[in-house]
Amino acid sequence: MPLSIATWNINSVRLRLPLVESFLDDYAPDVLCLQETKCPDDKFPFDALRKKGYEAIEVNGQKGYHGVATLSRRPLQLVEKREYCAKGDCRHLSVIVDGGNKRILLHNFYVPAGGDEPDPDINPKFRHKLDFLEEMQGVHAEDDRADAAVLVGDLNIAPLETDVWSHKQLLKVVSHTPVETETLEKLRVGNGWADLMRTAIPPEDKLYTWWSYRARDWNASDRGRRLDHIWGSPSLVPHLTGMDVLRHARGWERPSDHVPVIARFDFS
């Protein structure tokens, strides 16, 4: 049975609802994980998205900031909405997805951006980011609650040299500093996760999912970063059939600064 899982930092689900609806019409992933929904749970556009066939929706949101949501054309079972770092932020949601002959534990994360100064002693936002990553050390690819696990979301770190437009120029820029990239890779490798995006797309290839709003012409300058990720249990690697990074979505009308990424599996 095929299964497709998409992740997208939407940067306000209500503001960009037409883009979400159009994306669902055109690409129809089985599951869509959204981050930075900026929407309290009671204001989430349930009706509009259920009309698109996504009857199963779980949300963890707050007014004006952060927030994650997972919507599915297949049954979902809520597992956890975990509060990280005792900040009161809504940055995590996990569910069980019906993958046919597999039960998939799906984590949806929105890791703090970390501010501008990569020094935790003078920048509390950067300290928060590092503390959040430390708490994520408890999230493992092997979990007794399911047959396999997938972790998606805006992790706000571009770990590889080819995940940024200039490795040398960004070494002291938040999202690509050594303390961030090394911590994220330690988490991924130590907890048994496979980087499914780099399984499908060779690590030597440049790969971006985010382009700043500040660029006059984002496409021409192409100063992107891979901040959005899809990880999975190693047992999922043989079932991975494709990975779509919708670069052109950055050029849609009133776009998010992130683009959707879709992982495709076949469990036949």
Image (cartoon, rainbow, N blue to C red):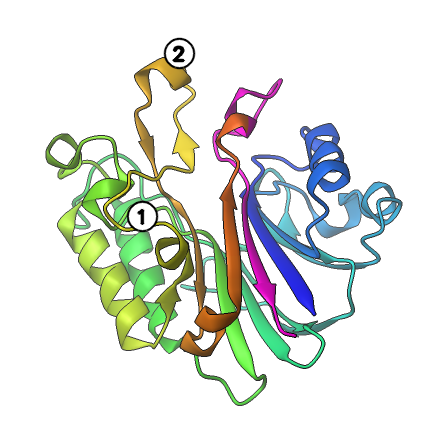
Picture quadrant where residue 185 is located = bottom left
Provide residue 88's location: percent of width, then percent of height. 52, 57
Q: In the displayed structure, would residue 195 be above or below residue 154?
A: below
Q: Quadrant of the N terminus?
A: bottom right
Q: Check whether the beta carbons of the residues at disc 1 and disc 2 lie within 8 A of each other.
A: no
| Front residue of this view, candidates 87 and 38 | 38
Instruction: Give the residue type that dot 2 points to.
Output: Asp
Question: What residue is at 77 percent from the left and 38 percent from the top?
Answer: 25
User: Which secondary structure, mark 1?
Assistant: loop
Instruction: Give the residue type that dot 1 points to.
Output: Ile
Q: Is residue 130 left or right of residue 265?
A: left
Residue range in magenta is 249-268
Q: Which mark is residue 217?
A: 2
User: Which secondary structure, mark 2?
Assistant: loop
Q: In the displayed structure, would residue 199 be above or below residue 97?
A: above
Q: Which mark is residue 62?
A: none
Residue 222 highlighted magenta (yes or no)? no
Q: In the displayed structure, would residue 239 be above or below residue 177?
A: below
Whole-Å distance between the Cαs marked 1 and 2? 23 Å
Q: Which mark is residue 157?
A: 1
Residue 264 highlighted magenta (yes or no)? yes
Q: Residues within 10 Å of mark 2 (few under 14, many from 20)?
A: few
Question: What residue is at 22 percent from the left and 53 percent from the top?
Answer: 180
Extreme top residue here?
216
Provide residue 193's location: percent of width, then percent of height. 37, 71
Extreme bottom residue here?
144
Question: What residue is at 58 percent from the left and 86 percent from the top?
Answer: 145
